[in-house]
Image (cartoon, rainbow, N blue to C red):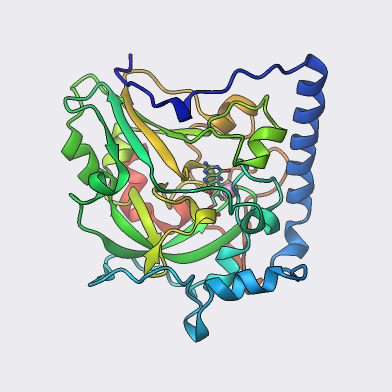
Amino acid sequence: MSQLILPKAWQRPEKEITPENVFNNRRHFLKLMGFATAGIAGALVAPPAFAKGMEAKLTQWMIGDNQTTGLPPIANLKRNPDYTYRRAMTKENAALTYNNFYEFTAEKELVWRTIDAFKPRPWEIAIGGLVEKPGVYDVDDFLKSFNVEERVYRHRCVETWAMVVPWVGFPLSDLIQKVQPKNNAKYIKFTSFDDPAVAPGQKRYRDLPWPYTEGLTMAEAMNELAFISTGIYGHSLPNQHGAPIRLVTPWKYGFKSIKSIVKIEFTETRPATFWNTLIPKEYGFEANVNPDVPHPRWSQRREKMIGTGDVFATVKYNGYGDFVAELYE
Ligand SMILES: Nc1nc2c(c(=O)[nH]1)N[C@H]1C(S)=C(S)[C@@H](COP(=O)(O)O)O[C@H]1N2
Ligand SMILES: [Mo]
């Protein structure tokens, strides 16, 4: 199906895994998942107390009152006023220090501390499958042809934490128009990197269905809300948010918003995806935010903002029904 020629670094290293390791690792990973979930009610209010030496790293990311990462600001950035969020913006230090990025660790407070070996440059992105213009591009060359804007979006993790952050990027539909999918393309599949040498979670939980993958229908992908993010808070993406390029689908649970993309493919059939493969009963392919459909292990009626601990009622489609409800009628 795919015409891609994959660079060596993306190929899964042939590692021997014994059945015993597979079982223990998977059980441990899933246990951590459950544990993290049970901790939600208490955890998120303040950024964690950092171990000695780690404060310096955070300070390095947070320059003065702007709480920026120290990454250079993006010039002439315009905030698109079409997307209202009706909630207080999350402070950057809260978003930087509470992440889901299972390639690194299953513990959200620790992602930012396990991510320095990961290098988002140089980076290649492959476009393939049912598309007129397949190719492998240097990410910076590829991104040059898109105009970035800022959009403030709500984000709702399936595990009930939420945030409001200013993403920098461009509509996914711009990318799709550029690469010209064929008429029989029905889905778009995204693939993250696979490199256990720099990602301790991938090394430890080697039997999970890496690389992380996600997908959308073409209609969802063409919706104006679907966004390719290359930055956050006015600068490029720090590692923990999915550098150098990620997806943002704010009407869906956060796990759909795949980070650190290396491959985008157009397919005729629905692609297998990471969480859906691992636990299909708990993580559906569609995964639209919906307070009326509980997760098998917890209610989805309420959500808690990271940084402040404010609790809100969860809204269908995460409040973006005006944009997307028609896709599902
Ligand atoms: N590659 C990859 N992408 C990922 C994840 C992940 O573990 N790996 N976690 C997802 C989940 S569950 C959420 S809630 C968001 C979190 O994004 P943030 O850490 O930038 O807030 O990223 C999503 N994208
Ligand atoms: Mo999530």
Q: Is residue 278 visible?
A: yes
At 69% from the left edge and 45% from the top edge, which residue is drawn?
106
Above or below, 191 relative to 110: above
Across and down, in percent, residue 301 comes to 62, 54
Query: How many numbered badges does the structure rendering display?
Result: 0
Q: Is residue 45 visible?
A: no
Across and down, in percent, residue 197 comes to 61, 36
Q: Is 56 displayed left or right of 12 in the figure?
A: right
Q: Nearer the viewer, residue 131 or 275?
A: 131
Across and down, in percent, residue 120 comes to 44, 48
Q: Nearer the viewer, residue 215 or 292?
A: 215
* Residue situated furthest bottom in the rendering: 65
At 59% from the left edge and 47% from the top edge, which residue is drawn?
101
Above or below, 186 relative to 222: above
Which image quarter: residue 54?
Answer: bottom right
Q: Nearer the viewer, residue 186 or 189?
A: 189
Screen quadrant of the N terminus = top left
At 29% from the left edge and 41% from the top edge, which residue is drawn?
138
Q: Is 185 displayed left or right of 86 in the figure?
A: left
Screen quadrant of the C terminus = top left
Q: Is 226 displayed left or right of 253 in the figure?
A: left
Above or below, 180 relative to 107: above
Across and down, in percent, residue 166 comes to 40, 66
Q: Nearer the viewer, residue 160 or 273?
A: 273
At 22% from the left edge and 72% from the top edge, which residue is drawn?
76
Which image quarter: residue 237?
Answer: bottom left
